[in-house]
Amino acid sequence: MILRVLSLILIFTTHLLVGQELPEKIDEADFSIGKSIGIKSKVLDEDRRLNIYLPSSYSEDSLKTYPVIYLLDGSKDEDFIHISGIVQFGSFSWINMVPESIVVGIENIDRKRDFTYPSQNELDQKEFPSSGKSETFITFLEKELQPFIDSTYRTTELKTIIGQSLGGLLATEILFKKPDLFDNYIIVSPSLWWDDEKLLDEQPVPYDSNKSIYIAGGKEGEIMERTTKKLFDKLKGNQKQSMYLFYEFLEDKTHGDALHIAVYNAFEKIFNPNKK
């Protein structure tokens, strides 16, 4: 009976195609949204790969300069493609949500190593045996990556970092310890549980430049939700006139799908002066 049904389906499908004239393919080409660049890092003592999105106007106006958005977890199989899509969409003239920007996606080799500072928690040490090298990675960002991007592309001084999960932990550590590395911080679902939440006990380094900080998390359990809100409250308690601070609880999102909408909302708030 099953074979008879399958035969009838095949006959019906073949009948539909008989006499149907398909269009002729006249050409085919690869489609790319950016560049992939390998660099040799002396600080990290390894080769690293960067994915670069350039606005369409970059090749049309040789005098124009662009802000840079640095994206942690920035490989094509992570967040580079969809975040670059938000940047492209947001910079359309009829949307005008975000300025035309260069996106630098940093591919991972060992994110547990690069995004965490040393933890005194034995379970952290056991589950993340390579962890604790964030200081070296931050030095790479400061001493090698940013100078490389500024010397290779036409950039402005405006720099944004986007980090989610362990990347959000790293972005928070940079904000607390070396805040002047970036002007805008987009911190989503940060893993502030690390090292028994000790980063939240630290006093952030003071800074004088303007900062826009967007913090968001989804329905991710008591620890994640509490520590994300605690980060916002801590910064709000120390808020200065030069700090624009935003917080969102995305109740219909989880740890796995909060980033996309959070980044969209962050761009709206950070780059739209009417929302500050």
Image: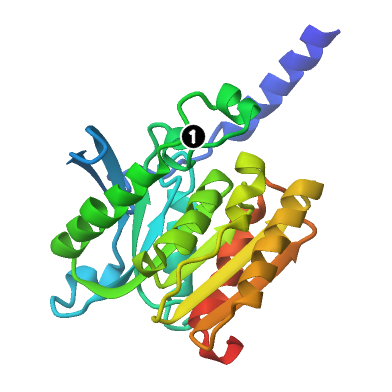
* Image quarter in which the N terminus is found: top right
Residue drawn at point x = 74 percent, y = 61 percent: 250
Give the residue number, with chain letter if any, for mark 1.
Answer: 112
Mark 1 falls on what kind of element?
A: helix
Asked if 3 appears above or below 229 in the picture, the reply is: above
Residue drawn at point x = 18 percent, y = 74 percent: 60
Q: Is residue 71 left or right of residue 120?
A: left
Asked if 46 appears above or below 107 in the picture, the reply is: above
* Image quarter in which the C terminus is found: bottom right
Q: Position of residue 257 (x, y in %)?
A: 66, 49
> Of all residues shown, which one is farthest toward the right?
1
Q: Is residue 47 left or right of residue 102?
A: left
Q: Is residue 16 left or right of residue 38?
A: right
Q: Position of residue 192 (x, y in %)?
A: 63, 49
Q: Position of residue 149 (x, y in %)?
A: 22, 59
Q: Nearer the viewer, residue 96 or 249?
A: 249
Residue drawn at point x = 62 percent, y = 56 percent: 200
Question: Residue flagged by tag 1: what amino acid is it?
Answer: Lys
Asked if 139 appears above or below 156 in the picture, the reply is: above
Quadrant in the rendering for residue 61:
bottom left
Q: Position of residue 249 (x, y in %)?
A: 74, 64
Q: Residues within 10 Å of mark 1 (few under 14, many from 20)?
A: some
- Coloring basis for residues: rainbow
Q: Inspect this view and state whether residue 192 appears.
A: no
Q: Nearer the viewer, residue 162 or 224?
A: 224
Q: Is residue 65 left or right of residue 192?
A: left
